[in-house]
Amino acid sequence: MPCLEWLDPGTEERGWWEEEKKEGGVKWMQLEHRGPYFVPLYEPLPEDVQFYYDGKPFKLSLATEEIATFYAKMLDHEYTTKEVFQNNFFHDWRKEMTSEEQEIIKDLDKCDFREIHKYFVDKNEARKALPKEEKQKLKEEADKIQEEYGYCIMDGHREKIGNFKTEPPGLFRGRGEHPKMGMLKKRIMPEDVIINCSRDSKIPEPPEGHRWKEVRFDNTVTWLASWTENIQNTLKYIMLNPSSKLKGEKDWQKYEVARRLKDVVHTIRAQYRRDWKSKEIKKRQRAVALYFIDKLALRAGNEKEEGETADTVGCCSLRVEHIQLHPQLDGQEHVVEFDFLGKDSIRYYNKVSVEKQVFKNLQLFMKNKDPTEDLFDQLSTNFLNRHLQHLMDGLTAKVFRTYNASITLQEQLKALTNPEDNVAGKLLSYNRANRAVAILCNHQRSIPKTFARSMQVLQEKIDAKKKQVEEAQEELKKAEEEFKDKSDAKAEDNVEKKKKLLKRLEEQLAKLNIQATDKEENKQIALGTSKLNYLDPRISVAWCKKFGIPIERIYNKTQREKFAWAIDMAGEDFEF
C-alpha cells in the first residue's frame, strides 16, 4: 500500500468516470488515513476575565467555565433571546456543575456573561488585526494539519477528506424552531470513534493515553471514521471530499436514476390516478401520497432519527391537523392548505389546488378522525417505497424529488433565458430558475442579519451610479451642441467618447439594479441546497456552455471540483 508521505498528488491523470467500475457493493480495496483531527482542549480564561452571579464575581470550575463560554460567545445572537434555548442550556449546564456550583447557581437571569463575551469579541478583533506575517504563520500551521489529516490513500489515489476535524463542543442550534436548541454538544473523544480502513494499511494511532472505540475493515461503506453525537443520538461520519471519486460516482448514479424516471413517470402517474378510485383504501392512500410527493416534492417522512423529539413530519406521517380542505379559496377550487413542520423543523405552509378526486379522497381519509390521527393511517414509507421499487428499479420518494427539481430547472431555464441578455441578465434568469426549484423543495432560510445593511449599501451604489448617468447625459448633450456649432473632427470624437461613457455607465447601473432585484428575491430562499443536492449539474454546465456563461459564475472552486465529472461530460445540448 502506498504510504501517505510519498504518494505524488499529481499521479491521478484520468477522471474516475473513465475508470472501470467495481462490482458487488465493494467501494474500495485499499484505504489508509490518519484518523480524525481532534479539536484542541479547552484553554481557561485569564484571571481578570470573570463570570458574575447575582452581581458578584464567581469562580467557576474548569468544565463549568468552558460551557459558560459557549453561551457567552452567543450573547449577541438571536438564539440566546429564545426561551427554549435558554432553558435547554441552563438545564444541561447545571448537570455539568459541581454540587457547590449547583447550590448557588439556580437562576439564569442572575448570570452575567458580558465580561466573557467581551473577551472573545476582543480576541476575535485582535486576530483580524494581526500583521500579515502572523496571519501567514497561522495559515502555514493550518496547512500543515490539512496536509497530515486532510488526505487519505484510496486504491492508489491520494484523495482529499471532507471534514477531517471532529466537531468542537458547543451549544446545539438546529434549524427552524428546534426543540433541542441550546442543549450541550459534548466533546468527541477517541473512545467515541470507530475507525474504518483496510487490513493491510497502517492503522491510525489514537492520541496518546487514549484508544479507539473500534477498528473496522469494511470496504462496502465509504466513511473513514464515525461516532454518535449526543443531541439527536445520530451517527456522524468523516467522509471523502465532495470532489472525490466515491462521492462523484454516487452523485452521478443518483442523477442517472432520476433520469431513468423520465422514461416511466407518465406510466407511474397514470397508475396512481387509476388508484385514486381503487376499492382498497390502502391503495387510495398510497396513490394520494404519491401525488403529493410528485406534485409538491414533499419528503416521504414517518422515519425519525433515534432520539429525535421534534414534531416533524413528512408526507406519509401527516396528521389530520396538518391540512385544511377548502372547496373554494382565492378563486380556486379544491384547495388543500398544508401547515406542518418538515425536516430540520422548517415550517411547510402551502395552499394548493388539487384534482377533484384527490380532494374527495382526502375528505374520506379525514372522516370521523380526531385532529391528532394520521391522515394516511394505512400507509408507511416502507409500503410506499416497496411499491416504487416495483415500478422502477432504484426508485424512492427522494428520486421523485431529484427528478422534479432537475426537470423544473431545465424547463425554467428554457422559459426564462433570453439569448439577447447580457451576462448579468442571464445570471438573474438562472437564479430565478433555481429559485423556482428552491420554492418547490421548501428550501427556506431566515433573512440574514446583514441583509438590511447590505441592501442599503447596494442602494447607495445605485443612487451614486444614477447621478453619474445623469451627469454623463448632460455631458453628452453639451458635446452634441458643441458639435452642432463647430462640426469639426475633434468635437465629433468628443461626442463618440461621451456616448461610450454613457453606455458603459448605463450598463453598470442596469447590473446594479439586477443585483438588487436578485438579492431581494433571494432573501428568504436557500438556493445552495437544491443546487448542490437535487439539481443535475450537467443541466447548469450545458446552459453555461450554450449561452457563453463562465462556469465559475455558477459554481465556486470547491463546487467545480465536486462536479468535475459533469463539466467534462456535458455538452451544450445535454438534456436531463
Image (tube, rainbow, N blue to C red):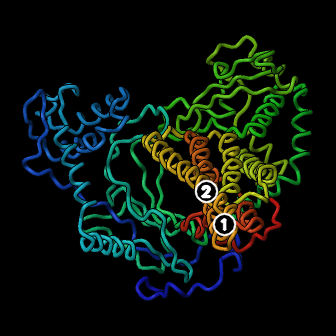
What number of labels is visible?
2
Give left or right: position of 310 versus 555. Answer: left
Give left or right: position of 133 versus 17. Answer: left
Give left or right: position of 342 versus 447. Answer: right
| Residue position marked by numbered label 2 in the rendering | 478
Give the answer, above or below, for where 91 lies relative to 2.
above
| Residue position marked by numbered label 1 in the rendering | 486
Q: Residues within 10 Å of mark 2 (few under 14, many from 20)?
A: some
Q: Which mark is residue 103?
A: none
Which residue ends up furthest to the top in the rendered image? 368
Q: Give the residue at x 33% y 58%.
A: 191
Query: Which is nearer the eye, 374 or 182?
Result: 182
Q: CA distance from mark 1 to mark 2?
A: 12 Å
- Residue 204 position within the rendered picture, expressed as x and y whole percent measured from the top left: 38, 73
Q: Contact (CB < 8 A) between labels 1 and 2?
A: no
Query: Which is nearer the eye, 364 or 182?
Result: 182
- Residue 294 position within the rendered picture, expressed as x and y whole percent measured from the top left: 78, 40
Q: Is residue 422 visible to us here? A: yes
Give the answer, above or below, for where 140 lies relative to 185.
below
Give left or right: position of 212 versus 463. Answer: left
The kind of secondary structure element at disc 2 is helix
- Residue 287 position within the rendered picture, expressed as x and y whole percent measured from the top left: 82, 33
Q: Residues within 10 Å of mark 1 (few under 14, many from 20)?
A: few
Residue type pointed to by label 2: Lys
Q: Earlier in the sequence, mark 1 or mark 2?
A: 2
Residue type pointed to by label 1: Lys
- Residue 442 position within the rendered picture, expressed as x and y whole percent measured from the top left: 63, 39
Q: Is residue 247 visible to us here? A: no
Q: Give the residue at x 58% y 49%.
A: 470
The quarter of the image holding the C terminus is bottom right
**Closer to the eye: label 1 or 2:** 1
Which residue ends up furthest to the front in the rendered image? 485
